[in-house]
Amino acid sequence: METFLSIPFLIFLPLVISLLLISPLFTKNEIIVRRFSKGVFTFHFLYTLLMLACFDKTNPYVSEIHFFGLDWVQSLGIKFIFQIDSVSMILTVLTSFVFLLASIASKFNIRENQKFYYSMLFLLMSATLGIFTSADMFVFFLFWELELIPAYFLIGGWQTFRSEEESSKAKASAVKFVLFTFLGSMVMLLGILLLHYYNYVSNGILSASFSDIIDSPIPAAIQNLIAICLIIGFGVKLPIIPLHSWLPDAHTNAPTPVSMVLAGILLKTGAYGIYRFNYETMPESFRVLAPYLAVLALINIIYTALVAYAQVDIKRIIAYSSISNMGLILLGMCAYNQIGFSASVFHMVAHALVTCGLFMIAGIVYLRCKDRNINTLSGIAAYMPRLFGFSVIIVLASIGVPLFAPFISEILTIIGALNSELSELSKMAALFSLPLLIISSCYMLKFLHKGFFGEGKEEYAKINDITVHEFVVLGAVLAGLIIFGLYPEAILGMI
């Protein structure tokens, strides 16, 4: 069976489909484009499940691409090499799943220029998979930068259901996202170049592969400088305050399926970068910086939770909630023990499922009511009981109610941080982050109470409840939250 499993096929199939869709040879019939795209996303997800079923965590998948028998840039030791270990496998399956949900959600949210839209969605998927599977620093950076192109068009390129003012804001948000990420990438590239150079000076090995750099005897001061450069680059995407201001605007102005991908997957690339470069490749410098990162994680958790409570736009509430939850992921890594790291990876999955569900709910409400302001929405529950039922359960899951996946990851994060042996700062950050459970309950229940309860408006009397497509997306999200909440070992056992 393993002879049929290929990392390059996994990564580059979406890229090939992207080029096919955007070419003039492919039909312009939007129904065919939509159904073909969903078929490919479904096939890709099933293929990742097959790779997962055959995966052996003691024997990761490895693949290298040669060009005319040579490495990519052989004179500099840069190889087009990929590897899927336990963490990569989890994030690869999660990526394929979230993109499948986004493609299903696109039916009613994207109604124009679908060839270009799905082409960009496939390109973004290919870039993201490349990030999660790259085993070479420069190949990682190549896919990291490639991600900018489709993300820019997906955030700001669609006019559906938008006024001229909203369209202008979307384009501004897309530009802001690209500028923040690109500037962070330049700092990150400096760190990668320094790491490549000093690894050669210290080891005498001219290689950009992660396996050749782990525990390299680079001087401590240089290591810390490199680590800071890398954290700044990844901190933009994670995001870490004060590098976060692009995210609420991007989430608010992007179409619903794109918001699902941004929150569910793209933010995780920042966390994965810190894991792959800092946590795994330069552990000594990470041990030095971890207590200070734990403080930044605490700021992420508490500050953005308070800001989320002050918001009235549903999407901005979810966006600031995402920043707060990414602080939990960072705090888990800063514990620098097995419990904290396992919790960090587990919360990547739990948060992805929750945000997909919440953004889907926000998108459905906006499609029906043409409004996302919780102060003007009222009484939706009476007209959309099925949506209300899903909303109650997903909101309860998001605030960490037992039996759902976020409860497991939040508790494990706190336990891991309290057991950290690096510094008392990590333990203090864990204690002070406990109010997150209360604050998140406040702003999520506020959204539920103001939006769904109260006296119904006359103009809402004719709106329809959720469709089959929307039911499938919300049902899949809810199933994942319950399955991993009841059986967390499915993920924890792989790490």
Image (cartoon, grey):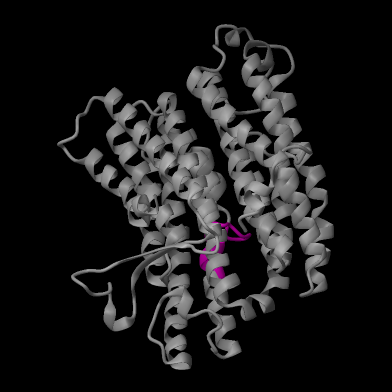
Residue in view at x 74 percent, y 33 percent: 396
Q: Position of residue 11 (x, y in %)?
A: 36, 53
Q: Is residue 471 left or right of residue 193?
A: right
Which of the pair 43/371 is nearer the observer?
43
Residue in view at x 40 percent, y 66 percent: 141
Tell me: residue 95, above or below residue 212: above
Q: Which residues are magenta?
A: 231-243
Q: Position of residue 61 (x, y in %)?
A: 44, 61
Residue in view at x 75 percent, y 31 percent: 446
Q: Is residue 30 magenta?
A: no
Residue in view at x 70 percent, y 44 percent: 406
Which of the pair 74/354 is nearer the observer?
74
Q: Is residue 92 left or right of residue 422?
A: left
Q: Is residue 106 left or right of residue 312?
A: left
Q: Position of residue 395 (x, y in %)?
A: 70, 33
Q: Quadrant of residue 25?
A: top left
Q: Residue furthest left?
A: 25
